[in-house]
Image (cartoon, helix red, strand yellow):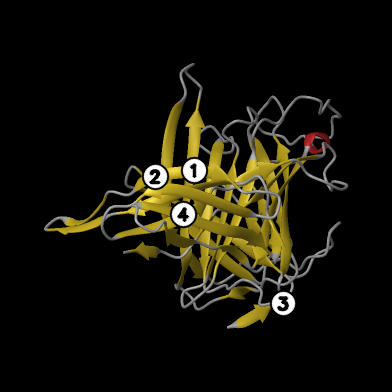
Amino acid sequence: MRGVNRMSVALLLALPALSTVGTSVAESSGGAELRVAAVSGDHPEIDIALDFSTVGRQPGRVVLYEPVGFKVYPIRPEGSVIGRASMTAANSAFGTPTYSSLAGDVIAHEPPAQATCGAATPIGLWELELTLVGQPFEVPLLVDGPAASPVPNGGSIALCVPATSDGAPLPVLSLAFTLDGIPPPSRRGSYLWRAVVTPLASDRRTLRPQAAYELRAIVPVSHRLALSAARTPGSQVVLFRGRLTAAGKARAGVFVRLVRLSRTVTPAGVRVDDAVVGWTTTRRDGTYSFRTRVIGTRTFRAAADPTSGRCHGPSIAPAGCLAVTFPAVESDPLTVR
């Protein structure tokens, strides 16, 4: 297996030739988001999700730039499972939208010998081997080497979505895939992922490059939500408190939930009856606190929701940057006796 130290990711939806007609890009792109989470430990992985469900315009091309520091290994053993993938598509041809969900694995294969899908000749090939109502649906990911970019990055991965029966690209609402065996960087910092999304023109076949917009996702290393507890003497009231930090810096104004964990082993499996017992937002210094009654021995966990905000700094897309996201994070479980 050979690693690529600097890797960008270009997710390209397979299309005919680009449209060269200039069009307005003033309309809103809604709540489209890029979300990236890095999981460390014994089974590291990268989780990447793109949501276009509220945009109102079908995406035609997505170029995802990976920050320097992550190491994606494009060449894997033939037939090995790299991760998992899911996709949601919609069809409004008959007036009422119908939705389809596809899911499957990401499998490594030998790369093609020539350029395809509008991308350079790849050095690796992965495929999203999805199924739709029991029917196979293969989506290739063409892994390329270092490429020119407006931001520091490495190579590219081209995601080519096959056309539907009428020859038009599949109308994608959301896409998510996991890449196994890729740990987050060891160096502390805030790692910025960028996606440039080019929507389709009104004919739903050609691209509108002037309408391309940017999405961002920050992956902090480390990202920590601390939780501690102290019982008020002579009472059942417990004070829970902690602090939320990203790359060592406080995160303020983030919604935090306190969850009481309840797991019961039954003949049918493990039954989960977790319950939210409190919520608050972090203060300017990242701290938060809850007070609640606790009877007997109970186990709790704090959870900070994913957040989305406005972008800062110049954008690499003609229509600007729409949103930047932070991933969710949970504390370690805490038992109060």
Among numbered discs 1 and 3, the one appearing first in the sequence: 3
Among numbered discs 2 and 4, the one appearing first in the sequence: 4
Graded by Cα atoms within 10 Å as few (under 14), some (14 to 19) or many (20 or more), the crowding at tag 3 reads: some
- Give the CA distance from mark 2 to mark 4: 15 Å
**Percent coordinates x, y for residue 92 in the rendering:** 51, 23
Q: Which circle marks residue 33 in the picture?
A: none
- Asked if labels 1 and 2 touch by Cβ distance under 8 angstroms, the answer is yes
Give the mark toward the camera: 3 or 4. 4
Find disc 4 in the rendering and name its residue.
239
Secondary structure, mark 4, is strand
- Give the CA distance from mark 3 to mark 2: 42 Å
Instruction: Give me the residue at 65% from left, 80% from top.
Output: 3
Amino acid type of the residue that numbered disc 1 sits on in the rendered structure? Trp
Amino acid type of the residue that numbered disc 2 sits on in the rendered structure? Val
Find disc 2 in the rendering and name its residue.
276
**Percent coordinates x, y for residue 213 in the rendering:** 76, 40
Q: Which circle marks residue 279 in the picture?
A: 1
